[in-house]
Image (spheres, rainbow, N blue to C red):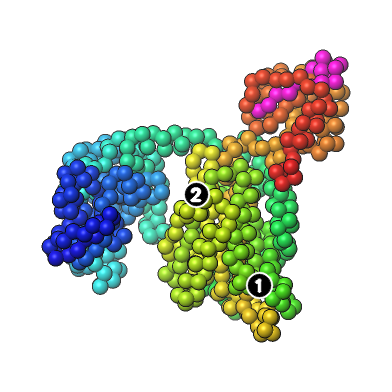
Amino acid sequence: MYSITLPDGSVREVPPGSTPADIAAAIGPGLAKAAIAARVDGELRDLTRPFAGDASLALVTMRDEKDALELARHDFAHVLAEAVQHLFPGTQITFGPSTDDGFYYDFAPKERPFTEDDLPAIEAEMRRIIARNEPFTREVWSREQLIETWQRQGETFKAEWAAELPDGEELTIYRQGQWLDMCRGPHMPTTGKLDPQAFKLTRVSGAYWRGDQKNAMLSRVYGTGWLNKKQLDAHLTMLEEAAKRDHRKIGQEMDLFHLQAEAHGSVFWHPKGYMIWRQLEAYMRRRLDAAGYDEVKTPQVMDARQWEKSGHWGKYRENMFVIPDEVPNVTDEGALVSEDADWMALKPMNCPAHVLIFRQGIKSYRDLPIRMAEFGCCHRNEPHGALHGIMRVRQFTQDDAHIFVREDQLVEEVAKFIDLLDSVYHDLGFTDYAVKLALRPEKRFGDDAMWDKSEDELRRAVLASNLPQRIKDGFEELEGEGAFYAPKLEFHLTDAIGRTWQVGTIQSDRVLPERLDASYIGEDGERHRPVMLHRAILGTFERFLGILIEHHAGRFPLWLSPVQVVVATIVSDADDYAHVVRDKLVAAGLRVETDLRNEKINYKVREHSLAKVPAMLVIGKREAEEGTVAVRRLGSQGQEIVALDAIVARLVEEARAPDLC
């Protein structure tokens, strides 16, 4: 008999061959009906998968939303694949994972790529499959059985993948009715557990087989999937709002930046966009100065041997822009005569260069911590298909810093950083965020003892910080998602419409100081290795500005707005007074434009509202005579008449950066 321990501590004895579904039925018919999966020794499994021995068991229902959503989205992907193969015979299947808000599946159509015109028919077929209420059944197959089945069915992509699976691995397929797919699972008991009104297919795109542009182009069908229609409707509403806030659209409307093919993955900042950048950079520089950071500037290009020493050449080479450090000889036709030139690389990150600065001169234990900051321009060779506006680029500027600490200083220094980050986020309008601890990946430098120590230190630093208790009590741990050299704390912001963005990070690194021979003289007169804290608050300026644009929908707080005030005239008789108003505002340090065009005032108001100007000072003949202005605020239908000196003083106060208030 197997002993199965339930969450309340009770133990049930069951014979071999028993399943979580059997225990659910024994507890009661209500639970048997509600259960959709099980956690066995913490692992999410099918209800009908037999126990292999003594185990702990927690039954999963729709109330366990995180697990339920993951299961539902995986199920929707399988239903999507069956629907497509039924409607388009000869289509080959590849892979179909769940995503953060839905699912997708990659197909190799027999005749033509799929288009969005195909989606309504596919959705209808998916609903018919759900209504059949077919059970998901798990079967263990041999690798040879998998390969033979896929080859017989003409599934060349699946056969290729199956041929590469290791011999000793347990290989499983899942059926729903007669349709099957190679899959690790788990799944819900039947397709009927899915709400047929809780999904929507959203778009179609191209995708290369296994992500390699040398391989066949596939059709990727995306969908969003939820537990019920209410959740779906809320998500679709959020997507509509997100489309209105798209930073690319707002960036064009406000004349902030543009992107073009001549510099794929790099941003052309226009004067107004770069003004926002400058204000944000100045704010961050003041905060870093006050927190005891020293700002540095390091080279854009370094010898490949330095990247090899740091470990980046072996782990990160495919994402680096590499150049020869001299132009090799070429023939008249342009062919290389010699390929023996040494290689250099544009820096994808700042950390190795900061170690080289640390190594200049002898450092004492009394000198630590050393906080070294750089607004460093970096380059990473991101795939073309991964680029997205200014959110995912190839050239970017990090608000980067590295802190060199003694072992005994580490927890306190990380806690100080967390408190600084919390203050910055509040200043920038983000009061809701989550902390996550990314733990050791499978491929990594350093032994387990080092990783145990580093991970525990970051846990203790969160608890030692001044973060709200609700965050400290509930920060999530992410298995396998740390960097190859260090665990890291991640900070995930929630924006105005509920989306999350991972921006800030701090990593506790003992590997790089060892590889690059960084040391200090300890109190004992011996050389010691510092611990290197890699940290960022904004992440990159480009991405964070994109987040700010979408969070505020372009309606920046006054201190960040590229144009803070527009002075607009109603009649030409007020032009001279408009110049007086402008000059007073400029003298007070405000960013001002004048609009003296011969246009109706309603036209001017509408145009500057679209440009998201926070304040308009409207001037007619009466205002010019009385020394007043009519103040119109963005988003308000009304206006107020205010004396010129009073509104200047008020706007100056409103325009102070948060750290200067």
Comparing 8 with 61, the one in front is 8
Position of residue 570 in the picture relative to residue 502 (left or right): right
Residue 484, percent from left and from top: 50, 69
Comparing 599 with 62, the one in front is 62
Name the quarter where the C terminus is drawn.
Answer: top right
The three-letter code of the residue at mark 2 reads: Arg
Vertical placement of residue 568 versus 117, above or below: above
Q: Residue furthest top?
A: 622
Vertical placement of residue 455 versus 639, above or below: below
Residue 80, percent from left and from top: 28, 45
Vertical placement of residue 66 versus 592, above or below: below
Position of residue 238 in the picture relative to residue 86 (left or right): right
Position of residue 344 in the picture relative to residue 84 (left or right): right
Range covered by the magenta-colored residues: 620-634
Residue 113 seen in this snapshot: no
Distance, label 1 to label 2, CA atoms, is: 36 Å
Which residue is at 86% across, 27% downward? Answer: 580
Q: Quadrant of residue 321?
A: bottom right
Q: Specify which label sits upstream in the sequence, 1 or 2.
A: 1
Q: Mark 2 = which residue? A: 470
- Dots 1, 2 in contact, CB < 8 A: no
Position of residue 271 in the picture relative to residue 149 (left or right): right
Q: Residues within 10 Å of mark 1 (few under 14, many from 20)?
A: many
Which residue is at 61% across, 64% downward? Answer: 412
Comparing 587 with 34, the one in front is 34
**Residue 160 counted in the magenta span:** no
Asked which secondary structure carries label 1, the reply is helix
Task: Please give the label number shown on residue 355.
Answer: 1
Comparing 491 with 171, the one in front is 491
Residue 164, percent from left and from top: 30, 68
